Amino acid sequence: MKKKITKMLLVLAAILLVASSSTTIALASVLNQYNMNDKGAIEIAPVSWYDQTVSFPETEEEKPVSTGETFFKDYFSAETLNYSNYTSAGFTVTDQNEVVWETETEVEIFKVAYENGEGYVTAKSFNGEKIVAPGTENSYLFKLKNSGDTEITYTLNVDAFITPGDNMIPIEARISRYDEEWIVGGPDEWVDVPTLDTAADEASLSPDRYTYYTLDWRWPFESGNDEYDTFLGNLAVEEDITITIIISTTATAEESAPGTDPDDPDSPDEPGGGEGLVPPDTGDNSILSIWISLAVGAAVFLIIILIYKIREEKRSKTEASKN
Amino acid sequence: MRKNRMMRAASALMVAVLLTTSTISGTFAKYVTQDSAEDTARVAKWGVELQVMGNLYGDSYGADDKIVKDDDGSISVQSVNYSANTDDVVAPGTLNDEGFSFTLTGSPEVDGKITSVMTFQNIFLKEGTYGLMIKVPANTITEANFDEYADELYTVSGTIYTKVDAWAGNVDYYTLEDEVTLHVDGDNATNQAAYYPVVYTLSGNTFTTGTTYAEDSLKAVAEAVATALGGATVVDDTLGNATLKYTNVLPFDSNKDLADFKLDNLEITWAWAFSINDMFDGADTILGNLLAKRNGEDIIVVKLTDAANRIFDATLEDYIDYCLDTKFALDVTVEQTDDDSTP
């Protein structure tokens, strides 16, 4: 009886080994083009995806809505979409300069030189570093897109700080969303840097949907405190007084079969609505190599035991027949 | 025993396979993406420095006629208000050759403009013939001895002093002293000219044409400074009191080295010569008497209005016929602009 149980266990283990091996091989063949970077994030897909033209809405008609139409398809004709090359991650953030956010991506919220309304340069860094000064301002627009097949929930957080921390730069800012919701500040309201540091938003994006935010900042030319502005400008000769703005997004997708969303009647039946694969968004910080090594090691031991067991039985039978 | 061990080993291996399989599949089944973007900028540098060095005038001058500190015991000229420290003075023989200068440095990273406002005024005596009317003591002139003094006597009507040829009765008679006619370079024949006793120079150069004393050297220096500063000059002559104001606006681009404007080459000095010739000495005397009159002394300074009939008028207007004050004020402001007005 015990022999039988042992055999059964060994057979079960062997079946499991085969199943997990084949699953791993199948997944790896699809996911091998993704590499996790040091931060554990999946890197962006091959360049071919960005051959597509991305344009930001300029009119009311072009603004995305959160339900109903599939705007991703509305923006691009079927001819320009090439799903055989469409191997992107499901959530991406890009800005007006087509810079794709990854981790701590340097973007152009600030500039090296600024022009006035007539197009004349009125402030310019002498060494190529980005600067701020009275009279300078800028708007930074960035787009969050869910190009996957599952709904995602995202959070947006802003960190803003001045170094050294005992100085205050009289910069004002505000952030708006595409639907004219103000994350911080308002149409006639600007907030200081400490308040900007608390800006946050949370929302969801259905498949093939996107949203965009606009960060406006300015250092008023006539702030009413020329003396303090001059003090900062003179202090800047001796030491760098800097302002840093960090915008972070975290997107979490629901676990569901690719291409299906039983709650969304408009969800396409096939992934992406066309040919090719639509890989899921994946990734965490697990060190897969350790687990895979463990699995392989266990499998090897299992095989050794099996072989040993078979030989033992043969030897026992041989000895029994001799006796 | 061996079989039990084998069973346990097999069970443990199966558990291990199950665990690793679930972990790997769990990893691939999780959907999380994190992105972030950041940017940093520093405050643009300003760092404009304007330094003014030296004093143009003083309330005391030493034996060498130069401005001295209060504790210098060797004084040759000193303001009557010295102890009150309310005013500076200039006088024949005094000078300032150490200069009054200013420097402008900095390379701001923003566009800006330099606004310079010069306000100045110089001592002068307008061209003409001047003198002092001295009253003859009463009862000195009689009808009997009138002829002895006839060529020297004047009578007054209001502020008009007229030379008399005949006995005019028991009235006040005056004599004319320290008569001087201002001419160019002391030439008494022709070319009457004003007299500007204090001669200003810019970086050792005078900018007046012709003779130094006949033209306003301070105005010439101010014009030269305005030219050196560049930009447009707006002249305001409505201030009165013989005062002029020059305003210059010089725009500059970001990262312009302000030292390139070479404002530190602009050094202003002055001197009032002690004794040039008899004519200028006489003019200095007239100016001194005018100052005494302004300070309340009973002095009558007259100006010839009718040469043929030797008629003099005591009505002299301060800042029109003469000016007893000199000053030079320079205000320089450097400020950021947000409109590009660089020529």
Image: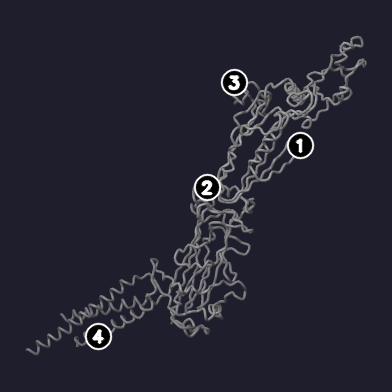
Q: In whole angstroms, how far apart are the C-alphas of marks 3 and 4? A: 119 Å
Single out the mark in the foreground, 3 or 1: 1
SS state under label 3: loop
Taking depth in this image into account, of B190 and B154 the one nearest to the observer is B190
Quadrant in which the N terminus of chain B appears: bottom left
SS state under label 4: helix
**Residue to which mark 2 is pinned:** A235
Q: Are marks 2 and 3 in contact (CB under 8 Å)?
A: no
Q: In whole angstroms, how far apart are the C-alphas of marks 2 and 4? A: 77 Å
**Residue to which mark 1 is pinned:** B240
Q: In whole angstroms, how far apart are the C-alphas of marks 2 and 3? A: 45 Å
Task: Judge whether A41 appears above or below B86 on screen.
Answer: below
**Residue to which mark 3 is pinned:** B73
**Residue to which mark 4 is pinned:** A11
Q: Position of residue A323 (x, y in %)?
A: 6, 89
Q: In the rendered structure, the residue with mark 1 lies on which chain?
A: B
Q: Where residue B39 is drawn, which disc sits there?
A: none
Single out the mark in the foreground, 1 or 4: 1
Q: Amino acid at mark 4?
A: Val
Taking depth in this image into account, of B58 and A297 the one nearest to the observer is B58
Are both tags, 3 and 4, on one chain? no
Label 2 Cα crowd, 10 Å radius (few <14 / some 14-19 / many 20+): some
Label 4 Cα crowd, 10 Å radius (few <14 / some 14-19 / many 20+): some
Q: In the rendered structure, the residue with mark 4 lies on which chain?
A: A
Q: For this view, does A35 lie left or right of residue B48? A: left
Q: Amino acid at mark 2?
A: Leu
SS state under label 2: helix
Single out the mark in the foreground, 2 or 4: 2
Q: Amino acid at mark 3?
A: Gly
Label 3 Cα crowd, 10 Å radius (few <14 / some 14-19 / many 20+): few
